[in-house]
Amino acid sequence: MFALVRMMLRLAIRLIFTPTTAPVLLEVVKEVVIRLVTGAIILLCVVSRAVAVPIYLRQLGLIAMNPGWDVYFNQASKLMLFVAGLSGAGLILFNVIRAYREKGRVRTTLIEAAAP
């Protein structure tokens, strides 16, 4: 567990202090994955806003609903936004960890192949 945290801190420091951070991230995570994660976050945000629609309709007087339900709809909407952020971060971290593990396997294979 400590090795994973250390690896993530190294990556974060590298991304922060490298002048061109985008190419560093793209060499670890493919552009397609970044686009898919962005799309997933946007879709979850749309669902979050859709959950809040009954609140707005009640406030406009278009539907008759108990105002006590507003709290539940609002909490569900915020939960969906939270899930969107966590899922995006989780997907990116998963792919970063997978790429670093693959890099380690390739390095080990090359070292073993080069050894006499």
Image (cartoon, rainbow, N blue to C red):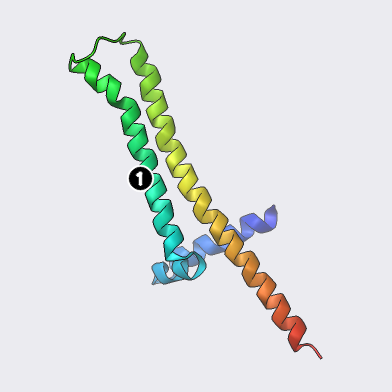
Judge by depth and name the residue closer to the eye, 21 or 89. Answer: 89
- Measured as percent of width and height from the top left, residue 2 is found at 69, 54
Position of residue 18 relative to residue 56, above or below, is below
Position of residue 45 relative to residue 26, above or below, is above
- Residue sitting at the far right: 116
Few, some or many residues within 10 Å of mark 1 (<14, 14–19, 20+): some
Q: Residue 21 vs residue 56: left or right?
A: right
Position of residue 35 relative to residue 69, above or below, is below
- Measured as percent of width and height from the top left, residue 69 is found at 36, 13
Secondary structure at numbered mark 1? helix
Q: Is residue 71 visible?
A: yes
The residue sitting at 21% across, 17% down in the picture is: 59
- The amino acid pointed to by label 1 is Ile
- Measured as percent of width and height from the top left, residue 88 is found at 46, 48
Residue at the disc numbered 1: 42
Would you identify the image quadrant in which residue 60 lies? top left
Quadrant location, the C terminus: bottom right
- Measured as percent of width and height from the top left, residue 112 is found at 77, 82
Q: How many marks?
A: 1
Q: Is residue 9 visible?
A: no
The residue sitting at 49% across, 44% down in the picture is: 87
Q: Residue 39 vs residue 7: left or right?
A: left
- Residue sitting at the far bottom: 116
Q: Residue 11 vs residue 42: left or right?
A: right
Would you identify the image quadrant in which residue 66 lies? top left
The residue sitting at 40% across, 45% down in the picture is: 41
